[in-house]
Amino acid sequence: MLPMSVQDIARVRFSEDVYRVQGLRADSLSLFMHHANLQAERDVLLFDNTKGIVLASTQQKLDGKGNIYMAGKITLYAKERSFNSVPNYTLMHFEQEKSAIIRFENMEVIRTQTDRFERLLIAGHVQNIEILKQVFGTLQSGCIAVIFCQF
């Protein structure tokens, strides 16, 4: 039996429940990751509301080299929002050493990072403008920001 790819998981989850993955089809995931232009040794700030599909794809692209800061919780319009539910990521069974690059952090910790982020990825139906306002100071000059939203 062959292991599932991120594309396979995206296809299956989309066919099961389109809202659970925020409308992210496998072809949209490919385009999203193409625009992100991820390469090894990048620092990525990620807001993933697709239950871990974008996290798995990002981790696969970085191949254990770089850092993924997954925003665990953020306050949007006076309401706390959690992004740390990643059941689709766990289906990939990545090696432990390659998964070590992922850090689930709250926004207070992310704002204090001395290294600036080279990539900002936002996936799913969230308040994108509000997130951009909160993380703008943590981004490098020339940072690539990619946002996927169904609506």
Image (spheres, helix red, strand yellow):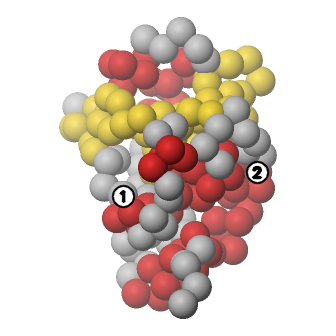
Q: Is residue 55 above or below residue 17?
A: above
Residue 86 disc label: 1
User: Percent x, y for residue 129?
Assistant: 50, 36
Q: Which quadrant: the N terminus?
A: bottom right
User: Residue at 54% across / 46% down in the picture?
Assistant: 98
Q: Is residue 143 above or below residue 91?
A: above
Horizontally, residue 102 falls left or right of residue 139, namely left
The residue type indicated by label 1 comes to: Val
User: Residue at 42% across / 70% down in the picture?
Assistant: 91
Q: Between disc 1 and disc 2, whose residue precedes?
A: 2
Residue 35 disc label: 2
Q: 122 or 89, which lies in front?
A: 89
Horizontally, residue 83 falls left or right of residue 137, namely left
The residue type indicated by label 2 comes to: His
Please tell me whether mark 2 sits on a helix, a strand or a loop. helix
Please tell me whether mark 1 sits on a helix, a strand or a loop. loop
User: Percent x, y for residue 138?
Assistant: 55, 18
User: Residue at 39% across / 73% down in the picture?
Assistant: 19
For label 2, count other residues whose C-alpha is less than 10 Å away and answer few (under 14), some (14-19) or many (20+). some
- Dividing the picture into quadrants, the one containing residue 142 is top right
